[in-house]
Image (tube, coloured by chain):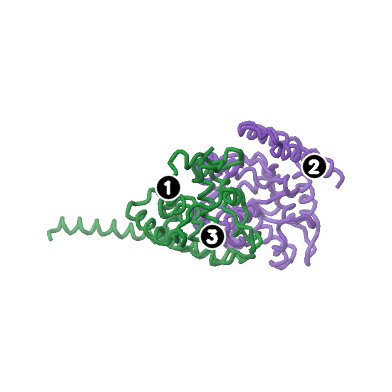
């Protein structure tokens, strides 16, 4: 190595050291995430049915927190979707279409799983908080897409029923880091209740399809 | 207290009128419902019962209380002992005497302990009022925040602990957890969204953060209470299906730092009045 080369190498090394020092003075992203999770654990207390384990993230929650507001790399999205798809439990009798009237009640019900709620229930899906469904209900939110005429527009096929069931059971299986809760996977709704909500979306007699 | 009742009754009547409008067999088209809500909000601005909390807080602030029979008049909210005017618009901030970042409520607790001799547990007890009791903390908060009305939000990130609190608060804002995988960002990360008919501010954008942060604390008509920012965070997490956020906890301060800093530049405009 001649003199000029060694000076250049030295300069590169100094730059590398500066980068490392920079990282040391301003903590890295992963470090801040870990600290934030720890501070959250010590800043909450269990109340009613909401215990501190609700602050322990699974892989989907942790990964989606990290990519919130950013583009999720394709391989990461595929990993999340694959793992969540595997978790879906299908009805033992294969019946995906329940009672749409009960589905409507579940879609309207906002209570459930909050520490202020009775642990004995009721537990709803609160679909209207985020989606438009039956046209009679004008008080609907817009965080999710409108689902009015869900079955009528897409056709009442077995595939579409299966998709609706799977999506409600575990939405992360179809759209990594969606805002939608995983109603079956997280034990919010039973298999029967999910089938009832599927009927609200997929039964030709449901007001959603009028 | 009679004044309160007279002031609130017309508002309550208006709420009932609104509710029955929704319940009527001829359901109004959604546009009309949204218009009615806008009218209702405009009507609310006429008189704000928050003034009663402000007056009570101003009075309590001067009262000699606690084991040391001292008032809070010498409390240093960041602009020096005794300066209340404009203090809230610069909070949260790093306090050298405590060697930590504090929001308003945490700082009031600090002053109750150091000046008045309360134990920390006593100072933090019952921070939110209910049907059967008024919370002194909410009165203090109403008074101190009212003294920043019209002052531009100016939260600094000069101290390393202030920068750390901001970064932690940002992470917490995007932290998904609980039975429903919700984060603050689930509801407050996009423009023009709503839950049912309730508009949601996008707290990741300057305009949304400014509008939301500068209008808390607020008198909540539906609860008949003045609600502090600590309460606002606490109740968001309840609906997020998280456990209960501890009053004046480190997470509450970090999140407040993130949101307050994002509101910089806007004139503070509270205590406000909300549905």
* Chain whose colour in the figure is green: A
In x, y percent, where is residue A90? 45, 59
For residue A160, which numbered disc appears in the image? 1
> Residue at position x 12%, y 61% from top?
A1
In x, y percent, where is residue B186? 51, 50
- Chain B: its colour in the image is purple
Q: Chain of mark 2?
A: B
Q: Chain of mark 3?
A: A
- Give the camera-side residue of B218 and A152: A152
> Residue at position x 69%, y 50% from top?
B227
Contact between marks 3 and 2 (CB within 8 A): the answer is: no
For residue B206, which numbered disc appears in the image? none
Dot 1 alpha-carbon crowd within 10 angstroms: few under 14, some 14 to 19, many 20 or more: some
Contact between marks 1 and 3 (CB within 8 A): the answer is: no
- Give the camera-side residue of A104 and A59: A104
| Left or right for B101, reference A5 | right
**Which of the 4 image quadrants contains residue A78?**
bottom left
Total label count?
Answer: 3
- Give the camera-side residue of A103 and B272: A103
> Residue B44: in sight, yes or no?
no
Real-space CA distance between mark 1 and mark 2, rounded to the nearest whole angstrom: 52 Å
Q: Residue furthest right?
A: B2
The residue indicated by pointer 3 is A190
The residue indicated by pointer 2 is B8
Q: Secondary structure at mark 2?
A: helix
Whichever of callouts 1 and 3 sits on the residue coming sooner in the sequence is 1
- Give the camera-side residue of B41 and B124: B41
Q: Residue furthest left?
A: A2
In x, y percent, where is residue A75? 32, 55
């Amino acid at each position: 190595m001649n003199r000029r080369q060694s000076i250049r190498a030295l300069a590169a090394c100094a730059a590398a050291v500066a980068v490392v020092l920079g990282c040391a003075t301003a903590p890295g992203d992963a470090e801040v995430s870990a600290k934030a999770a720890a501070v959250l654990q010590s800043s909450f207390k269990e109340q009613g049915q909401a215990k501190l384990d609700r602050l322990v993230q699974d892989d989907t929650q942790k990964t989606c927190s990290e990519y919130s507001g950013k583009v999720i790399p394709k391989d990461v999205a595929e990993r999340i979707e694959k793992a969540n798809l595997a978790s879906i439990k299908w009805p033992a009798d294969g019946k995906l279409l329940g009672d749409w009237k009960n589905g409507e009640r579940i879609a309207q019900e906002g209570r459930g799983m909050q520490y202020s709620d009775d642990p004995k229930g009721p537990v709803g899906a609160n679909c209207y908080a985020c989606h438009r469904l039956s046209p009679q209900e004008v008080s609907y939110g817009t965080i999710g897409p409108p689902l009015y005429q869900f079955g009528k527009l897409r056709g009442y096929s077995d595939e579409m029923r299966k998709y609706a069931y799977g999506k409600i059971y575990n939405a992360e299986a179809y759209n990594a880091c969606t805002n939608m809760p995983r109603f079956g996977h997280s034990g919010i709704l039973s298999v029967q209740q999910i089938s009832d909500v599927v009927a609200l979306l997929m039964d030709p007699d449901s007001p959603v399809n009028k | 207290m009679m004044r309160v009742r007279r002031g609130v009754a017309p508002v309550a009547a208006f709420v009932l009128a609104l509710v029955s409008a929704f319940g009527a067999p001829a359901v109004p088209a959604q546009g009309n419902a949204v218009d009615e809500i806008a009218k209702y909000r405009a009507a609310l601005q006429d008189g704000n019962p928050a003034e009663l909390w402000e007056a009570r807080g101003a009075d309590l602030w001067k009262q000699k209380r606690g084991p040391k029979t001292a008032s809070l008049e010498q409390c240093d909210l960041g602009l020096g002992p005794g300066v209340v005017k404009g203090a809230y618009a610069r909070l949260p901030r790093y306090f050298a005497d405590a060697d930590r970042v504090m929001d308003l409520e945490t700082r009031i607790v600090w002053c109750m302990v150091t000046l008045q001799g309360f134990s920390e547990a006593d100072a933090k007890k019952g921070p939110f009022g209910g049907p059967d009791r008024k919370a002194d903390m909410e009165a203090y908060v109403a008074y101190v925040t009212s003294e920043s009305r019209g002052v531009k939000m100016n939260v600094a990130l000069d101290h390393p602990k202030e920068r750390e609190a901001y970064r932690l608060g940002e992470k917490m804002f995007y932290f998904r957890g609980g039975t429903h995988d919700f984060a603050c960002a689930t509801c407050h990360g996009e423009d023009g969204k709503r839950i049912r008919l309730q508009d949601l501010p996008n707290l990741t954008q300057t305009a949304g953060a400014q509008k939301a942060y500068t209008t808390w604390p607020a008198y909540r008509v539906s609860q008949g209470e003045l609600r502090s920012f600590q309460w606002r965070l606490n109740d968001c997490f309840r609906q997020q299906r998280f456990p209960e956020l501890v009053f004046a906890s480190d997470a509450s301060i970090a999140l407040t730092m993130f949101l307050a800093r994002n509101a910089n530049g806007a004139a503070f405009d509270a205590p406000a009045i909300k549905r």
